[in-house]
Amino acid sequence: MSYIPQDTIDKVNQIPLYRVMEHFGFEQSHKTDKEIFYNCPFHAEQNASFEVDRTPNYKQKEGAVSLAGFYCYACSEQNPRSKGYGAIMLWAAIENIDLSQS
């Protein structure tokens, strides 16, 4: 198992989730004040049911980090804010690889 330095994880997690979706060629369906909706990268669908947080990752007091999350209302694929990893978790999930490889 590879070790990913924490500073590398912190830098990658500054990438907004919508940028990860754009990287993989997903187009926005619609957005609200807090979320952007896409077709889910984990299953075929015609209506966008996959949401990612619009809010960028940000640091809170004492160095604690709040990370953006994602959720599919159709297949329940998710990464809630409380789980952590933000952009890294989304990238790894789309690529279907072990988190230590992302």
Image: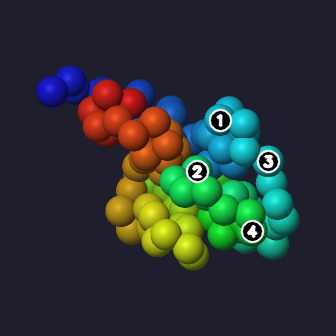
Residue 83: image x %, image y %? Answer: 36, 62
Residue 19: image x %, image y %? Answer: 69, 40
Is tag 4's residue or tag 3's residue first in the polypeptide sequence?
Answer: 3
**Residue annotated with mark 4:** 47
Q: Are marks 4 and 2 in contact (CB under 8 Å)?
A: no
Kindly report the distance in space between the C-alpha atoms of the residues bearing marks 3 and 2.
11 Å
**Residue annotated with mark 2:** 41
Of labels 4 and 3, the one closer to you: 4
Which coloring applies here? rainbow
Measuring 27% from the left and 33% from the top, which residue is drawn there? 100
Q: Quick one: SS at disc 1? A: loop
Q: Amino acid at mark 1?
A: Phe
Q: Are marks 2 and 1 in contact (CB under 8 Å)?
A: yes
Is tag 4's residue or tag 2's residue first in the polypeptide sequence?
Answer: 2
**Residue annotated with mark 3:** 27
Is tag 3's residue or tag 2's residue first in the polypeptide sequence?
Answer: 3
Residue 79: image x %, image y %? Answer: 44, 62
Q: Nearer the viewer, residue 22 or 56?
A: 22
